[in-house]
Amino acid sequence: EITDARIPQSSRNPEIDRMLGQKPRLILLNKCDVADPNLTARWCEYYRSKGILAIPTDCKSGRGLNEIIPGARQVLDEVMKRREAKGLSQKLLRMMIVGIPNVGKSTFINKVARKKSAKAGDRPGVTRGKQWITVDQGLELLDTPGILWPKFEDETIGLHLAFTGAVRDAIMDVETLACHLIQLLAQRKPESLAARFKLVPEEGMDGWALLEAGARKRGFLISGGEVDLERMAHILLDEFRGGKMGRITLELPEDLERGADPSGVP
Ligand code: G4P
């Protein structure tokens, strides 16, 4: 299951737990290149405490991808031993990528498929369509990912998905969205605002005040000395999504532990 390391909770659909049942799984914390490395390590630890192996990956550069096959074998170890004990032959193992849109499923499959060009179904007479790519001896990967829809259980999940661009349809106007983002950044990573916008959040400043101050610092003015909030909003969202504001993770494992566990991780 691929998730976005910047929003590990909101980029999962908790339905997956029900669908997977007891099937062995790996969670990839993808886009770790733009997430806070310390928090990514804490998320891995959180999943480990739930008995799930999570691996940080950057599918663009390929970082972390080498750990997936050993990880898959580790996760499957018990199944393999059970089969062996029953005298069953070593069956071909198959894995499928699942995740909500925009987490990097296609990037992952392309990266792995390019490296291992041997496609299991790539033989004359085999209908094109879903194909199994041999990624390692006895291990195949389905070339088509399973797409899950994000689950908007509360407003925060919708907002976080919109911040990262996972949901492209406007859930609200861009200025209000940016106002929520800048407020969260002021709480979670104020230094990113100082570095990028020379903006030092002051006590009592709400999202609108922060957005306006940022626009002034950047000189986004319109006639009459008014600030161009819309321009500031677009710039803030673009820079955050593009990783220009530094490596930022918006969600902490503690957020999950505090309330009911909306991720559904058992
Ligand atoms: P999906 O199949 O799950 O819907 O996601 P997809 O692979 O299409 O990736 C969505 C976007 O995330 C793409 O950016 C892709 O390049 C980017 N991406 C995937 N993996 C990583 C990663 O590990 N790190 C970073 N920083 N980005 C990643 P895009 O802007 O839509 O396309 P492009 O401009 O990169 O071509």
Image (cartoon, rainbow, N blue to C red):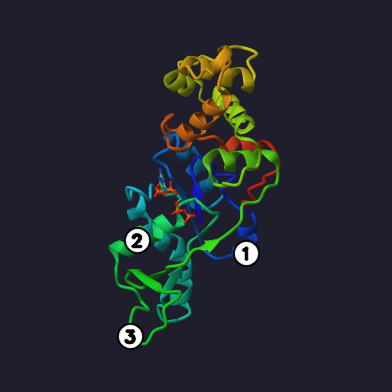
Q: Nearer the viewer, mark 3 or mark 2?
A: 3
Q: Amino acid at mark 1?
A: Met
Task: Answer whether residue 179 is visible to the viewer in this image.
Answer: yes
Does dot 1 land on a helix, a strand or a loop? helix
**Residue drawn at (64%, 19%) of the image:** 206
Residue 203 picture location, percent across and down:
62, 12
Per the model, the C-alpha gap separating discs 3 and 2 is 22 Å
Q: Which one is earlier in the sequence, the residue at label 3 or at label 2?
A: 2
Q: Circle 3 sits on which residue?
A: 124
Q: Circle 2 sits on which residue?
A: 112
Callout 3 touching callout 2 (CB < 8 Å): no
Name the image quarter holding residue 130.
Answer: bottom left
Q: Nearer the viewer, mark 2 or mark 1?
A: 2
Does dot 2 land on a helix, a strand or a loop? helix
Q: Residues within 10 Å of mark 3 (few under 14, many from 20)?
A: few
Q: Of all residues shown, which one is farthest toward the front?
A: 223
Task: Answer whether residue 21 is visible to the viewer in this image.
Answer: no
Q: How many marks?
A: 3
Q: In the depicted view, which residue is nearer to us: 92 or 146?
A: 146
Does dot 3 land on a helix, a strand or a loop? loop
Q: Which one is earlier in the sequence, the residue at label 2 or at label 1?
A: 1
Residue 182 picture location, percent across and down:
57, 26
Q: Circle 1 sits on which residue?
A: 19
**Residue drawn at (49%, 50%) of the image:** 103
The answer to whether the beta carbon of the residue marked 1 is less than 8 Å from any atom of ligand 1 is: no
Q: Which one is earlier in the sequence, the residue at label 3 or at label 1?
A: 1
